Image (cartoon, rainbow, N blue to C red):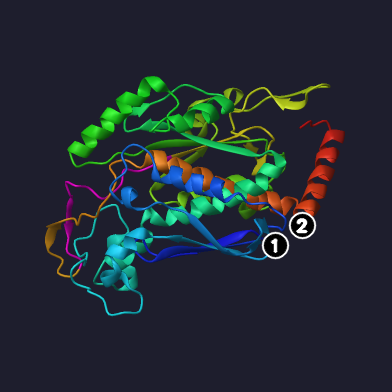
Amino acid sequence: MLRYLTSGESHGQSLITIIDGIPSNIELNIDEINEELKKRQGGYGRGGRMKIEKDKINIIGGVRGKKTIGSPISFEIKNKDFENWVKFMSPMDEIDRESRIVENVRPGHADLVGCLKYDFDDARNVLERSSARETASRVAVGAICKQVLKNFDIEFVSHVVQIGDIKDNKVYEFEYIKNNVDSSQIRCVNKDLEEKIKNKIDVAKKEGDTLGGIIEVRVKNVIPGLGSYTHFDKKIDGNLAMHLMGTQAIKGVEIGLGFDTASLPGSKVMDEITYEENDGIKRKTNNLGGIEGGMTTGEEIIIRCVMKPIPTLYKPLDTINVNTLEKYKASVERSDSCAVPACSIVCENVVAFVICKFFLEKFSGDCLEDIKNNYNSYVKRLGDRGWKK
């Protein structure tokens, strides 16, 4: 079973991750992993922290001579900013607990409930772990999973379709997104909207406010049959939703037409099925986003996620002191005015982990060669039933 565990605090020494279940003989390209980490740090609207950190992965175990060896892969992403936080965050030395104490808890953040749950008088203990800094680990995990899946021509891309009230209603082909998204600071492929969105972010920043938005993740060349209808926790769409909702600031997930299906009749929602000898079994449309009955259909997977505005505001909202219960303005931590473009990279790699997990469960094997044999055998059987890759 593919699984991973992350550890580390936002201003701690480093982020530590162990990922278990990657088969042997996968050749890793560390430059591609670091490129994903770099993309996570970019995007218009990011704050001062991104000027400090230059994230790079340091693989510690599970890889030899650039190839996986089947054992758990461990890696580290150092926090350069720890140099400025040693006297506040050192794990085993005496620390200054008062200078950076957080008592005026922020609405919309984990601060208050975390203090109540774990019996803290300092929300620093909460925010250091609940921070989106942890998503650097998940991006690296997803980047490793992508390098497994590229052996089977599975591709991923993501882009921003809305920030604030500015929405891109156009529909794009996968290749168009792939070829244009990285040249945009907003990760929006509609060039007509780019300056409007940047101006919107500038206004929010000037007013001490923040903006959320909607991200779309697309996955291409996934075989039919990943996931299962036989039990709720085997459904791939359920797992995708869980992992994406477990990503910081995500408040909603939809697949295909998603919530729009509520206003449409079934005849406008379901994807009609055709068969032609040259093309095999196909769908006329892809309204359900490449998933039916908890299983992939072979069509492109289309997922959208809603990211709420970041709760750290430079015009702080009313709150209380968690210890005295007196009324205050919320604490202000260094933050972004908009992190939707960066979140698209996070969500893309979270999706990559889930797809890889289900792929390896379906075509399980200890090494790449065994997985390829199992995969090719399945493709042949599908071909005998009328489906063509």
Location of residue 107 in the rendering, given as x and y in whole percent from the top left corner: 25, 53
Numbered range of the magenta stretch: 306-322
Question: Dot 2 corresponds to which residue?
Answer: 365
Assess whether residue 362 is covered by the magenta stretch.
Answer: no
Tell me if 290 is positioned left or right of 350 in this view.
Answer: right
Compare residues 58 and 14 and report the one nearer the observer. Answer: 58
Location of residue 243 in the rendering, given as x and y in whole percent from the top left corner: 52, 51
Which residue is rendered at x = 66% and y = 42% of the image? 150
Q: Is residue 191 above or below residue 80?
A: above
Tell me if 216 is positioned left or right of 223 in this view.
Answer: left
Compare residues 329 and 6 and report the one nearer the observer. Answer: 6
Instruction: Check residue 69 in the rendering and tell me which mark sits there, or answer none.
Output: 1
Per the image, label 1 sits on a secondary structure element best described as: loop
Q: Is residue 235 visible?
A: no
Q: Quadrant of the N terminus?
A: bottom right
The tag earlier along the polypeptide, 1 or 2, is 1
Q: Quadrant of the C terminus?
A: top right
Compare residues 47 and 352 and report the one nearer the observer. Answer: 47
